[in-house]
Amino acid sequence: MVKFLGDFATILGEMAPYLLLGFFFAGLLYAFIPREKIDKYFNGSPFRSSVYSSLLGIPLPLCSCGVIPTGAALYKNGASKGGTVSFLISTPQTGVDSILATFSLMGLPFAIIRPIAALITGITGGLITSVITKNESVPQQTSDTVSKPKTPGQKIKDVFRYGFVEFIQDISKWLIIGLVLAAIISALIPNDFFELLNLSPILQMLLILVVSVPLYICATGSIPLAAILILKGVSPGAAFVLLMAGPATNAATITMIGKVLGKKSLFTYLGIIIIGALGSGLIIDYLLPVQWFTEITQQHLGHDHGTHLNWWQITSGIVLLGLIVNGYIQKYRASKQQAKTQLTYNMMQTKTIKVEGMTCNHCKANVENNLQKLAFVDSAVVNLAEKTVTLEGDDIDLEKVKETVESIGYKAV
């Protein structure tokens, strides 16, 4: 237990300063680049839309649970299938926060290769999707909502509200799971354990791929796991498969893409991620110097637990834990407020529906915004904890509500 706590503190301290910086950049992207400004880049020629979609998606701090509703909304508002698939492939693999955290724990080579792999697979997936779905119809709707201009003060407030509250709420669960699993593996499994098993790098990649595709773990939460696996003897290429395939795929993502974009787009999405992950892993293990990918991990995580952390790493770790706790407190308060609001709605004409597939604040905003566009809906309030939406309005058409919810990738019950 002592070693587990020490290893947990070490990994947290190594990552925390870069995560806090990443959260700040995530807030800047959210506050100063509204979605309607990037919608136009998701159309045009297949190559243009694929390149722009990947370039725009790589720095965005969206994990797969957040990128699916965003991508579905873009597609519904007229984005091409190629551009949408390109965005869905490249975005969850990286993000400004995870790139910085990768550098902190795994070194510069991993931090460089990770966005490059996301860019190449995103462009390739978009181009292939554009070719095989060129005869399929695409929604020709356009968004009828434009963000109201905000003052500089409001934008600065949004930077900190999103970066240090909402975004942390979305990833904190998976970040903690990743840290805890990494600390458990570090404490219980001897160094070089996987080398003693004498598994070839290719077999290691295949085994990790089988686990990573259906499993969900965010781009940031996968970093401590990958770093610890390298320390325990897993090949760097196999660890990269986890970094690439883990965040980009999971069972819920696969279901939603198939429903919204169709089977052809889904098979392209899965095929490109699998081939890209294995190809990148093979390049790392067989073409590049292995010390590029192992020295930094040994330097950061190969010491006795907690003895080499600087004061600023310890302070950053405490601040990060405080922000995570604050996120859960804010989420609890919001849930209680929604319960009170529900009581007032009971005096009005309301309908409450169950919506499956909502997992984060991006999902909440996406569902609320789309339902509030319906003429007969005055307000739509999502309760993430209970997976429900409470609607207020006149002559609420539940069939139309269900159609709207399912058009953006969720399931209305």
Image (cartoon, grey):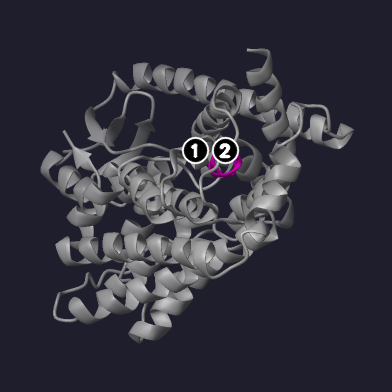
Q: Amino acid at mark 2?
A: Asp
State which quarter of the image contains the C terminus: top left
Q: Is residue 323 left or right of residue 64?
A: right
Circles 2 and 1: CB atoms closer than 8 Å: yes
Describe the element under mark 1 as helix, strand or loop. helix
Range of magenta residues: 226-232
Furthest toward the top, the residue is: 1
Q: Residue at x 76, y 33 (%)?
A: 303
The reply to whether residue 74 is visible in this rendering is no
Q: Which residue is mark 2?
A: 192
Decide whether residue 228 is among the magenta residues. Answer: yes
Q: Amino acid at mark 1?
A: Leu
Q: In the image, which is nearer the foreground, mark 2 or mark 1?
A: 1
Instruction: Choose between 32 and 60: the one closer to the eye.
Output: 60
Q: Residue at x 38, y 69 (%)?
A: 86
- Say above or below: 337 vs 210: above
- Say above or below: 269 vs 225: below
Describe the element under mark 2 as helix, strand or loop. loop
Give percent across and percent down for residue 334: 50, 25
State which quarter of the image contains the N terminus: top right
Q: Which residue is mark 1?
A: 196
Instruction: Choose between 220 and 211: the one closer to the eye.
Output: 211
Decide whether residue 162 is among the magenta residues. Answer: no
Q: Is residue 244 left or right of residue 157?
A: left
Give percent across and percent down for residue 71: 36, 59
- Say above or below: 51 vs 388: below
